[in-house]
Image: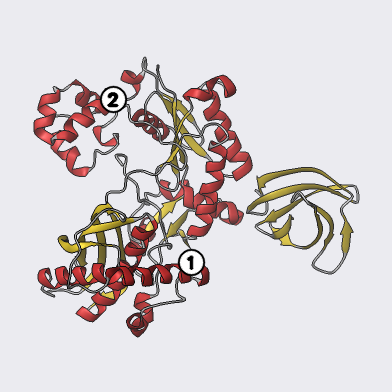
Amino acid sequence: MGKTFVKVTAEHDEGGRVRPLAVTWTDGRRYEVDRVTDVRQAPSLKGGGLGVRYTCRIRGKEVYLFCDEGKWFVER
Amino acid sequence: MARTILHVDLNNFYASVECLYRPELRELPVAVTGDAAARHGIILAKNNLAKGCGVKTGEAIWQARQKCPGLVCLPADFRRYLRFSRLARAVYEDYTDQVEAFGIDEAWLDVTGSARLFGDGTAIADAIRRRLREEVGITASVGVSFNKVFAKLGSDMRKPDATTVITADNFRELVWPLPAGELLYVGRSTRSKLANRAVYTIGDLAGREVKALRLLLGVWGETLWHFANGLDDSPVRRSGEEGFIRSVGNSTTTPRDLLSEEDVKLIVFVLAESVAARLRRHGLKCRTVAVSVRDAELFSFERQGKLAAPSCVSADIAARAMELFREHYGWDKPIRSVGVRGAELVTAGSLTQLDMFAADAAGREALERTVDDLRRRFGPYSVRRCALLQDRALTGFNPKDDHVIHPISFFR
């Protein structure tokens, strides 16, 4: 239970939509986001907090990536 | 035509929001408290575990700790609560434009006109509860009824995360056995007056003669009788529709007791500036100023007096408030809390009797409007009265924006 704040590279389009492209972990390892399958506002019950939740496929695994008022985190 | 009114009550609102952000605290008794160092150290909200220990909203932190030794006390973060309140409201507004907030965590919704789009009241209530849970992460109790008063009673009946329906057919069984104190606007003193006449439940109240209640409680008696019989027909205001404002006031409990007139003056200036700024924002002026004082032993009173001319200038309001204060306070005890209020409001554009010999009011008003502008652009502390800098610990608060939580009356 918990969350880790991460650095995110994202694309902001003309319509204001945001698509995360890559996540940089705290130790510097970089993971490409292969696909975003779902975007919705949701609370993070495991990590704590509320924000826009991106359901991402990263290296074959499904990961929830949250943007809580501009700060990005993943659940652990 | 019968209306369909929902009353949504966000469960343990402050505590739920804090627990959402701190999952590790979910299994512990949690309370959100005011700032003890600034002497606002009371319980503002608690979660169900703390409630189970008997912790009550409004009691001092030390009292709560005695009942519940493991209590986790968290400082309040109003900015965050306002964000959640807005998010919840956004959900409501998907179903109707008639959303009337009642404080930060409650709202009435009139969904009479939405039934053909979204289903009946119960369906909408359940949808709102599900969306609040899934999208905002907090739970709500919803009361569904044909008037505002019963909808509110319904939302109090089952908690958390439940829908209660009170209809014209079943309200006698559901509502009437409840104690009279549960009814909106039956407080401690009304309850004891009613109890003296053997009115203990809402049903007792509904069964009385209106005339007898009127004798006992005045106009209130009649209103409460209507409430109890399900005859409340007050409308749910539309989004953005502001109620009629009767007075504008601010008060504060100061971080330390006030010991001299100088101290009081500083606080009165801060409060008067906030009152004046709010009057200006609404395009109003006040004809009467009221000052309220509470001493260190919690005895309090309010005195009011007229202004020479309607005003929305802080210097006028502060001066009158100080006059009233000097007239009525004997300094037997130090002061704990002070409030300033502007009443008998008139619109700022209305015609007023000019005074040949008075200082130029228009100039001073223009000056204060400029200060409003500067504060809006550069922050509330960008321009301040020099006097206020004498004691920053005492005057470092902003009554206008710090918290606007319960400014609301049912009968606006």
Per the rendering, the mark at residue B376 is 1
Depth check: give the residue in front, A49 or A10.
Answer: A10
Q: Assign the C terminus of chain B to one quadrant of the image.
A: top left
Determine the CA span between mark 2 and mark 1.
52 Å
- What residue is shown at x 29% (from left), y 58% (from top)? B249
Depth check: give the residue in front, B141 or B59.
Answer: B141
Q: Quadrant of residue B228?
A: top left
Percent of width and height locating residue B173: 33, 19
N-term mark: 2 or 1: 2
Looking at numbered disc 1 in the image, what kind of residue is underneath it? Arg
Percent of width and height locating residue B14: 48, 52
Task: Examine the rendered structure and indicate whether residue B305 appears above or below residue B115.
Answer: below
From the image, tell me which residue sits under label 2: B177
Is circle 2 on the same chain as circle 1?
A: yes
Task: Examine the rendered structure and indicate whether residue B66 appears above or below residue B137.
Answer: below
Q: Quadrant of residue B118?
A: top right
- What residue is shown at x 83% (from left), y 69% (from top)? A27
Looking at numbered disc 2 in the image, what kind of residue is underneath it? Pro
**Element type where label 2 sits in the image:** loop
- What residue is shown at x 50% (from left), y 34% (from top)? B97
Q: Is residue B298 visible?
A: no
Q: Assign the N terminus of chain B to one quadrant of the image.
A: top left
